[in-house]
Amino acid sequence: MTSGYSVVNGLQMYYEIYGEGKPIVLIHGGGSTIQTNFEKLIPMLSRKRKVIAVELQAHGRTGDRHADLTFEQDADDVATLLKNLNINRADFLGFSNGGTTTMQIAIRHPEIVGKIILGSPLAKRNGVPEWFWDFMKQATLDNMPAPLKAGYKKVAADPNGLPIMHDRDVKRMLNFKDIPDAPIKSIQAPTLIIIGDRDVITPEHALELHRKIAHSELAIIPGGHGQYIGEITTLTPDFKESNLVVPMIETFLDRKTEQGN
């Protein structure tokens, strides 16, 4: 593994690179770090691929630009990072908020996108139950999942940045606006949408995205939000790597498509 920082649109943006081969970029969710989302996934994916994992604004080891978080800005930051790393084209796997960011990369920077994997992505406010928005209105640092707090403190240069990350993520979700249909339908990249059958993202929303993204496939996997990738808050004593969706992801990535990707 190699790691480093790159100057990206005014940020010192942190990244890690594992393995060799065709690049795939991993984009974490809200409140998360590379490790809290992808620690179980990276060793498996990097056996065949160059895995580039990033930490977005105010998350983990990446700094804060003293501006609200947006999915569009995150998408632009990732695109700039890849340019700095001399990577012209890559596949992308985004989880949760990272899935929404990955959609924005495909919308805003289609020239750098091979295939995309959208893990539990949100594109419309009705894509989650109403209780989710009520929960966000009451979200505090006290009820942030303990493994995510510990994961941040473990790696962050300034552990005191935790409230900043938390508050920026909450504000972004409270202000979340639907992605219009036209940009969603503009996505031409081969797409794999994955959710859990007990996910916060509803099956109806995942099916709606599947119908609107032309070259997409949909998988609904037994388990909760991120359990299919081994996200840290879902880990149980009986965790097994064989329960992860890596074979499905690798089959999707390796398959030849009409788009030539």
Image: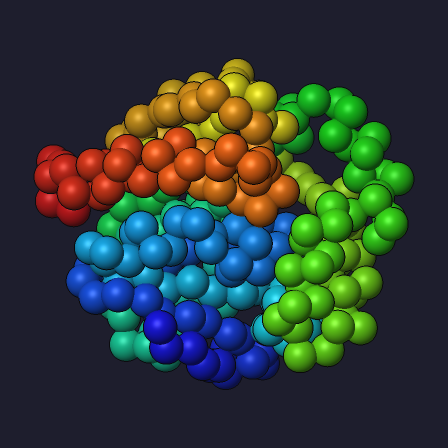
Total numbered badges shown on the rendered structure:
0
Near-viewer residue (219 or 177): 219
Q: In this rendering, is residue 4 above or below 198?
A: below
Q: Position of residue 173 (x, y in %)?
A: 71, 44
Q: Position of residue 164 (x, y in %)?
A: 78, 65
Q: Is residue 151 left or right of residue 74?
A: right
Query: Residue sitting at 20 percent across and 59 percent down?
Result: 22
Q: Position of residue 65 (x, y in %)?
A: 67, 75
- Residue 80 can be seen, yes or no: no
Quadrant for residue 115, please give it: top left
- Residue 239 can be seen, yes or no: yes
**Colour convention:** rainbow
Q: Is residue 126 left or right of residue 123?
A: right
Q: Quadrant of the N terminus?
A: bottom left
Query: Residue sitting at 42 percent across and 70 percent down?
Result: 16
Q: In this rendering, is residue 161 above or below 115?
A: below
Query: Residue sitting at 70 percent across and 67 percent down?
Result: 153
Which residue of the protein is positioned furthest toward the top in this rendering? 204
Q: Is residue 180 left or right of residue 58?
A: left
Near-viewer residue (60 or 178): 60
Q: In this rendering, is residue 25 above or below 237?
A: below
Query: Residue sitting at 66 percent across and 39 percent down?
Result: 177
Q: Position of residue 150 (x, y in %)?
A: 70, 59
Quadrant for residue 154, please give it: bottom right
